[in-house]
Amino acid sequence: MDWKLELVFVPVTDVDRAKRFYAEQVGFHADHDHTVRPGLRFVQLTPPGSACSIALGEGLTEMAPGSLKGLQVVVPDVAAAREELLGRDVEASEVDVQEWGSFVTFADPDGNTWTLQQLPARG
């Protein structure tokens, strides 16, 4: 039986600000934005090429805003991904090269952190 991770909740303080950050600055696709009722809003965004999306909103999670740490996304070229982020006014770390991959980190406006990883060449 396959188990597929398809949705991760990201706790934020301001849904509209977070939606703008992820869609306009980071480059995620804005899939849905639906207010079910007052106090329950669901916004879904998906990284380009990913089978897993993130959800932000109101009434979705009990996690404290900014408490999600270390979400990791694999990219083919971490230096190019970093340049894209910088070009969209996202603060990103320098590239950290390790034997097991190259990494760049960034945070959303609430402090939820992300790591971009470029896998090492396999031979």
Image (cartoon, grey):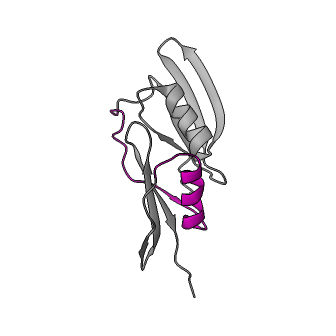
- Quadrant in which the C terminus is drawn: bottom right
Horizontal side of residue 42 vs 60, given as left or right: right
> Residue 38, position in %: x, y?
50, 11
Q: Is residue 35 magenta?
A: no
- Quadrant in which the N terminus is drawn: bottom right
> Residue 15, position in %: x, y?
50, 27
Q: Reply above or below: 15 against 118.
A: above
Residue at position x 62%, y 51% from top?
51
Horizontal side of residue 77 vs 95, given as left or right: right
Residue at position x 56%, y 83% from top?
122
Q: Reply above or below: 96 against 112.
A: below
Residue at position x 53%, y 21% from top?
41
**Quadrant hosting residue 100:** bottom left
Residue at position x 46%, y 50% from top?
91
> Residue 90, position in %: x, y?
50, 47
| Residue at the extreme top | 38
Query: Which range of residues does the magenta coloring cover?
Result: 63-91
| Residue 4 can be seen, yes or no | no
Q: Is residue 67 magenta?
A: yes
Horizontal side of residue 72 vs 62, given as left or right: right
Q: Reply above or below: 114 against 119.
A: above
